Image (tube, rainbow, N blue to C red):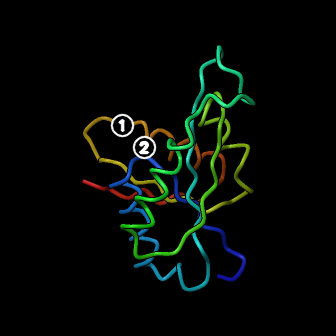
Amino acid sequence: VQGLEVQVLFTNLRQTLAALAVVSRLGLSLEVRPRVLIFCALPMTVPLEGRFIPAEFFEEKIRALNRESQVGFSVQRCICRHPGQSLRRLLRPHSLVVIAGKKRWWPTREEYLAGRLRRDGHHVLFVDAE
């Protein structure tokens, strides 16, 4: 397992904590430190390099995760136009990605993303955070 990177996508606080808990239960946290990816999508009218995002956008999420999680993790902040496209460019080939979401009768946004990442050749673990 050495050299394995585990990417956890931030969906919301409760779901991301569930994803981190699964990583911990699987024992993956013994060998690796999961990386939580937090995306902030900006509309085309807002420059990406500007200071239009309040610092609290990321910091509140990170503080809440640190306070509630039993697992150590690192964080990567991503400011972009299209989070799905940016994520696909960001991941190394055959990455292990953990996504939490609610399982529904109809596919959710998280399930669509999980399917797209699987088709791209990544190993995706979908956590039902009901």
Q: Where does residue 107 sit, x and y in percent of width and height? A: 36, 37
Secondary structure of the residue carrying tag 2 is helix
- Foreground pick, 24 / 66: 66
Please identify the quarter of the rendering in which residue 74 is found: bottom right
Q: Which residue in the structure is indicated by mark 1?
A: 107
Q: Is residue 2 placed above or below 73 in the rendered structure?
A: below
**For residue 50, above or below residue 19:** above
Q: Residue at x 72, y 77 (%)?
A: 3
In the rendered image, residue 80, in percent from the top left (x then y), is placed at 66, 33
Q: Are marks 2 and 1 in contact (CB under 8 Å)?
A: yes
Q: Nearer the viewer, residue 127 or 30?
A: 30
Residue pictured at 45% horizontal, 66% vertical: 66
Give left or right: position of 107 versus 81.
Answer: left
Circle on res. 111: 2
The amino acid sitting under disc 2 is: Glu
Residue at coordinates 45% horizontally, 59% vertically from top-left?
Answer: 63
Residue type at mark 1: give it: Pro
